[in-house]
Amino acid sequence: MVIPTRNEAGNVEELERQLDSALGGVDYEVVVVDDSNDDVTRPALRAAAVRNPRWRVIERGQRDQTGLASAVVAGIDAARGMAVCVMDGDLQHPPAIVPQLLATISAGADLAVASRYMRGGSRAGLDGTLRNLVSRSCTWLAQGVFPEARRTSDPLSGFFCCRRAAIKGLELKPRGFKILLELLVCAPRLRVANVPFVFAARHAGESKASTRQGILFLGHLASLFVYVPGGAGPLKFAMVTLAGLAVFASLLYGLVHAGVHPLLAWLTGTAASAACTLALLQLAPFRELGRHGEPDGKRLYYAAASVSAVTSFAVFAILLVPGKHHLFLGAAVGQACGLLLTLTVNQPPVWRRLARMLRLVPRLDIDALARRLGAQEGFWITDHGDLSDPRLNLIGGVVTREMVATASRHQQPALFVERKSARPQARLNIETSSAIVVPSVDESGEVSAVAVFVRTSRSPFESRHLDEAIKWMASHGRLSPVIAESQVVA
Ligand code: GDD
Ligand code: MN
């Protein structure tokens, strides 16, 4: 349990009591991250940590008191459990809900959000119509800008629980109050589930929410938009497209009125708008748009854009035949066709298939790699959460499910070699089992599958084989550069 507090003395004892009764059968710890500046909260928290061995308090000095969200990040860093639950320290988040959040994680979710905005939930304790209205519109704004935030009905909730391994390594830079939104946007692959809850009234003390928090929230939205390259994709796409269209339309209009031939005006407009789009795609916030996360996605994006430009030109040229009257209607229809084409190709399932058809993305042929490595067997394990793949039993005891799970969790390629005979005189003609395990990482940086290679022979795999497997995977864009540089030999 990670609990941020600031001047919550009156709530400490009741919180301790309610957590204790709610989490009867659970092995848990409480990490309080305290930024209090009154004289009573720190003594109250220290007393709790003394009488209750489950409680730990991190007292942040004045310089580190950078807000609720950073307190939560500090708490998550200090937490040790399999799951981390974040909740307020004023009992507006009822501890009785925590077991349901944990059950949701056990059932397979990476992130369980306690939601006020769904059937069974409410915000009874949110005081004032104004505060309600602000809360609701901030939620809509966040969800409007970031489709990532639509995975839950309450992206601004401060009450949630996540599987710790699923968020390991995430670099969070939250401002203000909204740590959950940060998680949703920075980890778009997390499986999210909602649990309804009633936002209660404060037990004691007063709220620290203020107009300043509202301004920080807008700043946080802007920072996520600018600095998370893959975030808010549709809005970024719309912005780049609209900018290109504006350049195109104004040039077409201006040139035609100046007496330039429509076809020439069209070509000039298209060239200028393509230049504008290309320039925008060089800017950090928009870079991911043309990239699709894969090294070869970019080539396809530009090919698709060129095809759509030619198509829209053809449509325009044909519609132009009846005469000048149809000029702008023709231009609109032509551009719409081009846009529609780009939009279709931009769907990940479509471009992935196209890229494969056009052989832009070389397929990682696991059998070919197995042959190169001299492995008897090479295969993918895709469902490494389950690890019930029967082939894992065939590896002669060198690789266990746990090893695959560990390699996958740490995103760490590894080489396993069976221990040589411990007898004083080891036979040289005895076969040794060895295995190479390489997690494959998809565009969001998460492990999507684990490649396993097995060799049982008198000369087992050596670290140069591991190097080769890593290089091969990296050249197919299946490893992040960080991973390609690190390896484990066991
Ligand atoms: N460490 C630390 N530092 N804790 C803080 C700080 C801070 O600067 N500011 C607030 N807290 C703690 C409070 O002590 C409390 O335990 C919790 O964070 C929530 O703060 P409140 O002041 O009670 O905020 P709220 O109830 O108005 O806002 C809550 O509801 C929102 C939904 O309407 C929070 O849970 C928000 O995260 C949530 O979005
Ligand atoms: Mn509160």
Image (cartoon, helix red, strand yellow):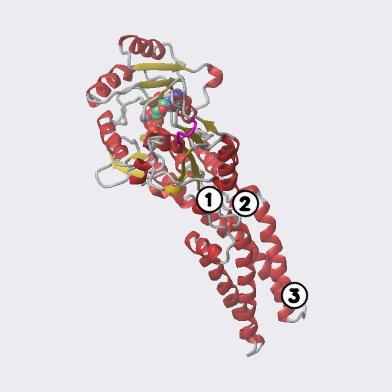
Res 162 quadrant in image: top left
In terms of depth relative to the viewer, which is nearer, 270 or 259? Answer: 270
Q: Earlier in the sequence, mark 1 or mark 3?
A: 3
- On-image quarter of the N terminus: top left
- Which numbered dot is residue 255? 3
At 68% across and 59% down in the image, what residue appears?
A: 278
Res 276 quadrant in image: bottom right
Q: Earlier in the sequence, mark 2 or mark 1?
A: 2
Q: Earlier in the sequence, mark 3 or mark 2?
A: 3
Kind of element beneath mark 1: helix
- Which numbered dot is residue 371? 1
Magenta extent? 428-433
- Which numbered dot is residue 287? 2
At 22% across and 25% down in the image, what residue appears?
A: 25
CA separation in Å, label 3 and label 2 = 31 Å
User: Which amino acid type is shown beneath numbered disc 3?
Assistant: Leu
Above or below: residue 415 compared with residue 42: below
